[in-house]
Amino acid sequence: MSLQQATDGDLEKIEIALLLEGIFRRYGYDFRNYSYASVRRRIWHRIHLEGLNNVSSLQERVLHQPEAFGRLLGDMVIPVTEMFRDPAMFRAFREDVVPLLRQLPNLRIWHAGCSTGEEVHAVAIILHEEGLLDKTRIYATDINESALQQAKDGIIPIERMKQYTKNYHAAGGIQSFSDYYDSDHGVVILKPYLRNNVVFARHNLVTDRSFNEFHVILCRNVMIYFNSQLRDQVHRLFYESLANEGFLVVGDKESIAFTPKADKYDTWNEQYRLYRKMR
């Protein structure tokens, strides 16, 4: 590597650091401890779409034009989700966790990083089928207000339903999946009663604190975008937010191993990343 190449790489890191610092101070969104490779890729994607040449030009635009920041934010928090994604995990949740939840007088569940709400509705369906939905309060939070609005509306493109139906049955669904939605003009509207006990709210895992005590926290495939410092910080938040013997569910590419609270959990199902907080 030449001295010029090394210098260019260092300069880009400085530019990105300044951009992320500016976003935090101007808009309150903190991406400073996200994975550098992921952040860099998304920033350059936006630079090309904006017709710009470098990170500093993007910084000037997003700090002076809130609508440009909105476009960048959409790139930084791309919603990736589907109903009953990883069906075997949802089957394990139904078979291994739900029987214990049934013993509680009421339930509080937190979907952290709920995106457009597909997994929120999936869990609501399981709880409905298991007779627990009426005694459950689900808190569905995300950093992206646009995604939260989609979750509140419960509207899904109809072309996704074939895959979602397949996922539902693989996850142990016991009814006809079509019972849970109405179709109209090329979209699917999930039944409103699935959201009756859901509170949708903006919450930033990076900067916000615990706001309740929960019996289950689901945060699947969100922390893969965090560096180790931020991941440890979020795991402390989840530990503080879980009731004794509460369950933590993370994504299939994630684990609590080597996190500050790893020794405070029993591994309930390692294959599907289900963990239970010890007393």
Image: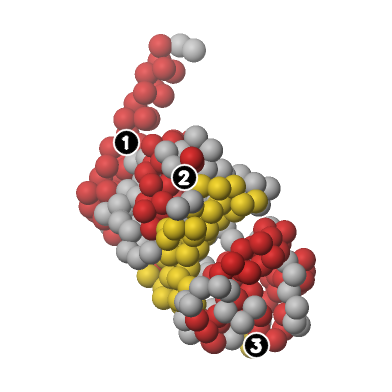
Closer to us: 14 or 118: 118
**Secondary structure under badge 2?**
helix
Say which label, 1 or 2, has the lower sequence index: 1
Is label 3 in a helix, a strand or a loop?
strand
Spatial distance from mark 1 to mark 2, Cα to Cα?
A: 34 Å
User: In the image, which disc is placed on residue 264?
Assistant: 2
Q: Separation of disc 2 and disc 3 at Cα?
A: 44 Å
Disc with the residue nearer the chain's start (3 vs 1):
1
Relative to the observer, which residue lies in front, 26 or 105?
Answer: 105
Residues at marks 3 and 1 touching, judged by CB atoms closer than 8 Å: no
Circle 3: is it few (<14), some (14-19), or many (20+) Cα within 10 Å?
few
Q: In this picture, is 215 found above or below 157?
A: above
At label 3, which amino acid type do we have?
Answer: Asp
Q: Local crowd at mark 1 within 10 Å, few (<14), some, or many (≥20)?
A: some
Tag of residue 17: 1
Task: Identify the residue at image location x=45%, y=53%.
Answer: 279
Q: x, y percentage for residue 50?
A: 42, 50
Would residue 50 be visible to someone looking at this image? no
Q: Nearer the viewer, mark 2 or mark 3?
A: 2
The amino acid marked with disc number 1 is Ala
Which element carries disc 1, helix, strand or loop? helix
Residues at marks 3 and 1, CA–CA distance in whole angstroms: 46 Å
Query: In the figure, is residue 103 to the left or right of 160?
Result: left
x, y percent for residue 174: 75, 78
* Image coordinates for residue 254, horizontal then vertical, percent: 57, 44
Q: Residue furthest top?
A: 2
Q: Which mark is residue 182?
A: 3
Which residue sits at x=31%, y=41%? 19
27 to the left or right of 143: left
